[in-house]
Amino acid sequence: MPHDVTGVPHLPEGFTERFRSEFVAVDGTTLHAVVGGDGPPLLLLPGWPQFWYGFRLVMPALADRFTVIAADPRGTGASDKPATGYDAATLASDAAALMTALGHERFAVVGYDVGMMIGYVLAADHPERVTSLAVAEAILPGVTPSPPLLMDPATNEHLWHFAFNRLAEVNERMVAGREEVYFGHQFASKAASPEAIPQEAVDVYVDVLRDPAALRASFEFYRSERSGPQVVERTRRARLAVPVLAIGGEHASAEEVERTMRAVADDVTGVVLPGAGHYVPEEAPDALLDALLEFLR
């Protein structure tokens, strides 16, 4: 199926009347974003192994107050899937160029999972453009303490994919043709309950990842050896002055997101969403909306 706004199923009622797909050429790569609403621009950066579709439940309410731009970073969704460019600095540069092309000089950012890393680098590199930054359910490489190799079983269920995803080739060979097994396990084990993300949504994500280029790209986010040093270099350059909202799920990262962001930013508000696991935009859309609308007003 196509993975733009016209091609994915199970969207909220009236979604396609309010939102449209935009395709923008950025440094030789075509990026896709779903755009709609009216008001100050708000950039949404999704998490792994998802794409813009992960924000579908919160986008209509956000569009009542903001011009929402839900982006597909390179390698995800309906964006191009080139062989290179999956380091934090390139991904952040892509996001800045996308917003410029869409006519938005200053904007707020919500970054979830991998989008948290992209959002942090974007705010660090473009402090004159990012008006506020909300981040959720992720680490910052080089900042967040690394867990031990031999973890307790519950922690291992949540974090083992970091090492697996960084493998050079064998992971692609093992997952190809079994995408629903690997990625289905990710959604089942990292949500607050195995049924929290409906199978119909998991099927949409897996459908993207059956494309060999998309599967490779999903691992390239983790394989990049440049992202960690890029993040650390920016923490040494200056602390973020922009207001930051740090969001964790009660049954996932919890307060760790706030602790991470307090290490790199001066104005941090933390919130933990009760009952939620890792996939907060889908597991706790109402609580996430309450937190975002209070912070972004």
Image (cartoon, rainbow, N blue to C red):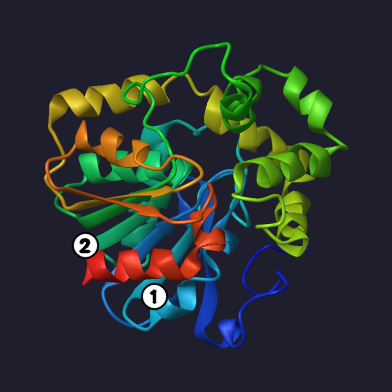
Can you say whether 23 is above or below 150 in the image? Answer: below
Residue 72, numbered circle: none
Helix, strand or loop for disc 1: helix
Residue 155: x %, y % from top left: 56, 27
Q: How many marks?
A: 2
What's the amino acid at mark 2? Arg
Query: Which quarter of the picture shows residue 297?
Result: bottom left
Residue drawn where x is 34% and y is 60% of the image: 99
Residue position for label 1: 62
Dot 1, how many residues are within 10 Å of its Cα: few (below 14), some (14-19), or many (20+)? some
Task: Report whether 206 appears left or right of 66.
Answer: right
Residue 124: x %, y % from top left: 22, 40
Dot 2, how many residues are within 10 Å of its Cα: few (below 14), some (14-19), or many (20+)? some
Q: Nearer the viewer, residue 202 or 256?
A: 256
Q: Is residue 127 visible?
A: yes
Residue 106, numbered circle: 2
Q: Nearer the viewer, residue 166 or 159?
A: 159
Residue drawn where x is 61% and y is 80% of the image: 12
Q: Nearer the viewer, residue 240 or 76?
A: 240
Query: Which quarter of the picture shows residue 197?
Result: bottom right
Q: Nearer the viewer, mark 1 or mark 2?
A: 1
